[in-house]
Image (cartoon, coloured by chain):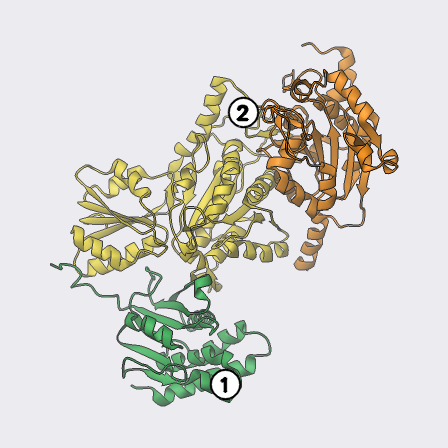
Chain colours: A yellow, B orange, C green
Amino acid sequence: MANKKKKLLQGNGACVEGAIYAGMTFYAGYPITPSTEIAEGCAKILPKLGGRFIQMEDEIASIAAIIGASITGHKAFTGTSGPGYSLMSESLGYAYMTETPIVVVNVQRGGPSTGLPTKVGQADTMQARWGTHGDYNAIAIAPSTVGECLTETIRAFNLAERFRTPVTVLLDEVMGHMREIIELPEKGDHEVFDRVKPTAKPEDFEAFEMTDNLVSPMPSYGEGYRYNVTGLTHDVHGFSTNRTDETIMKLDKLYNKIEHFKDEIFKSRVELVDDADVIFISYGTVSRAALQAMQIARKAGAKVGSIQLYTIWPFDYEMIKRATKNCKKVIVAEMNMGQICHEVQKVLDPSIKLETVQRYDGEIITPMELLEKLEEVL
Amino acid sequence: MATTEKQKSDITHKYLRPQKSFPSVWCPGCGNGIVMGAFVRVVDKLGYSKDEVAMVSGIGCTSRLPVYLDFNSLHTTHGRALAFATGVKFGQPKMKVVVITGDGDALAIGGNHFIHACRRNIDITCILINNHTYGMTGGQGSPTTPEDAISTTTPYGNVEKHFDPCDLAMAAGATYVARGTVTHYPQMEKIISAGLEHEGFSLIEIISNCHTYYGRLNRKGDAPAMLEQFKENAITTGKAKKMDEQELVGKYVIGKLHEDNVKSEFCCEYQKLIDHQKG
Amino acid sequence: MSKLLDKIEIPKDRFEIRLSGSGGQGMIFGSVVLCEAIGQSGNKSVVQSQSYGPEARGGASKADVVISDNEIYYPKAMKLDLLLAMTQESLDKYYGDLKDHGVLIIDTSLVTEIPTEEFYGIEFTRLARNEIGSIVVSNVMALGAICALTGLFTKEALTEAVLARAPRGTEERNTKAIEIGYAEALKIKKD
């Protein structure tokens, strides 16, 4: 195999590389620490590739612009952090409702409110699932290395296009800014999924038709289909409805197009759980501390395993159940006051004790803290 | 309601969506229908294909307009139509992008997007139907509700000052600005047509009637009475020049207020940047 | 009673470096070119991280680099193998993070109170001012010293990495800074 091109990149920069690899051609955003390098990277690279970058007046406008661009056929992208992600919430809901593929990277910092702009956090995990009002289903994924920032951003675009839905990529400040040397993928190394276009004649076209996989083919504006897009609850043609049966059909479609195909979305790294007495469960940067602690503890003779979630939402309850069935205790480690630990608790066998390591002081969880917890629970 | 042969022969029927059932959400006599009719007749005259037109709107009575027409339609969140439209236009610069909005949608919740769309001078035609109130939610005060006027949220008279959308657009950098009323139909077609053909951001403000709320609360009578009042209170730009500020209180200055064909358009500028950077 | 913590040790395949000084001394720039020099010198994994934001300007500034032949799990330093301290404040702040017998490199033109005998002292700032006429290159000079003392990367790779990132017109003084740092370190290198 020929030597691949290597590059020292920040996590934020790797997201840009991944998005470009996936075919992203439109970025709209607003500067916010610690995500700004994503906007800066896109501003620099996109015009060189014939793509488009626009700095909007706020995050509300940014997500609106990428939804508009996605409807004209672009793979559209934005990056932000907590306060911006909150501002995007309403139109994120619009994208769920109108089934518009977009990718949003949230480089998490300490919160709530303005919080700790330059410090790390993972407290937007639940927001990525429940951030906008109403019933819907959501996809959120979390890389843990600079290399994965690239590959998971590609995966985010593939999922967005495959499922016609927004996808949130949850980074955190440490990952956004840390640098690693990574191999840049070449064409063909990773699958790139493009949205399915309609084959029906415009006169027979139903914009939100029910299909076998519950995802409707999506034309771009200007291609002759002239359909209606609305955030109002709508029928298969895209026209608003108050009918109970059509409302149920729409909401079930939004929910089940993900729920019924979640095996295509799940991704996790499960290490040494079979004989483990204690299993760490974590995601994002914290997983690196967990793997480190596992490695150190194993060497010292402790039977420890690790589960790292790459897909946060939908949550893989079955995998957690399976992977923890032989252990005595699990330690859920996250940089918040406890979010994913509640999901784990839902499926944990009552005989297994759930322990937590939580930090919400703007600093990363260290392997030593995990080892100390391990010592305490062993 | 059966459609008569005469109605079918009307140009508007060529552009009404066959799947979309009428009657519309609008009250009988609402000025929105007059604007809709003018818009499609202008599009027909200009010879645009239905596929190249994208109509973007936010939330409100006015914002329902695109849904009835057989173009690409994007009915978005409250106040954000111009931001969505910026994505559509910049994403597909060949499209004719039209935003249909109301005074609350464009100037209150969407005020920030309004001034920035003007500033960028992106080639979007913004038709702002100004009825001085929030119709859909039941007659609350808006940024264009005149001082002392009654609304359901200004039950003792409006103590706030109002925006002049045209002044705002000109100050923010829009390159075509005109005002009309639903009473002055031929002139309305003319300024909508000029706005669509203008390359850059154009604001077309159409003064319209909400007799159901604004009219009733302020004792302005029914729809015909309000249309009559627009006729009485409209002043052409030529006449307005000869009048002082005091004489213009409560009047609508109608016609082309501003046109700049020199300032560069956003998408064109970015295309130049692409051409240069791609080498 | 300690069961596990007594038995644990930091994996030996990690080499952890911290460059510390005050804001403006180019510690972050230094850490980035260090990573690139290591990248050019072989197939090692490297992770760089830094303290970020307003609190990183002025006062103590630090950047960490972790190097390994294997996958690097934890991205930040746990126990330093090498500490570069360009100021008294940074030495005071981070000396405790250095492992026993770790490599300590100090800018002895700025640091006077040193809590150990076991260190390499080079007057980076004074040499940069006197020999090159610019204290801005003291960080690059320190990288030359790290190169000579650790052998983690070649001098050529370092020079290439520095020149690729340094502003045009500074090639000569940067190259000279690397040479001086390298030579000074060799003079005092212990086997």
Amino acid identity at mark 1? Arg
Q: Position of residue A147 (x, y in %)?
A: 43, 57
Regarding residue A228, the answer to whether it shows in the image is: yes
Regarding residue C44, the answer to whether it shows in the image is: no
Q: Position of residue C167 (x, y in %)?
A: 57, 74
Tell me how far mark 2 sits from mark 1, CA to CA: 72 Å
On screen, residue A291 versus residue B238, left or right, reads left
On screen, residue A65 versus residue A88, left or right, reads right
On screen, residue A329 versus residue B35, left or right, reads left
Amino acid identity at mark 2? His
Residue displayed at 44% across by 38% down: A131
Identify the element where label 1 is drawn: helix
Identify the image quadrant of the C terminus of chain B: bottom right
Q: Is residue A47 above or below residue A58?
A: below
On screen, residue B112 versus residue A103, left or right, reads right
Mark 2 and mark 1 residues within 8 Å of each other at the beta carbon: no
Q: Nearer the viewer, residue A186 or B159?
A: B159
Q: Nearer the viewer, residue B114 or C189?
A: B114
Identify the image quadrant of the N terminus of chain B: top right
Residue displayed at 51% across by 80% down: C174
Badge 2 crowding class, 10 Å Cα cut-off, few under 14, some 14 to 19, many 20 or more, is many
* Residue hosting label 1: C129
Q: Nearer the viewer, residue C65 or A181?
A: C65
Residue displayed at 80% across by 29% down: B189
Q: Quadrant of residue B115?
A: top right
Q: Which chain letter matches label 2? A: A
* Residue hosting label 2: A234
Q: Nearer the viewer, mark 2 or mark 1?
A: 1
Q: Nearer the viewer, residue C131 or A239?
A: C131
Q: Position of residue A200 (x, y in %)?
A: 60, 28
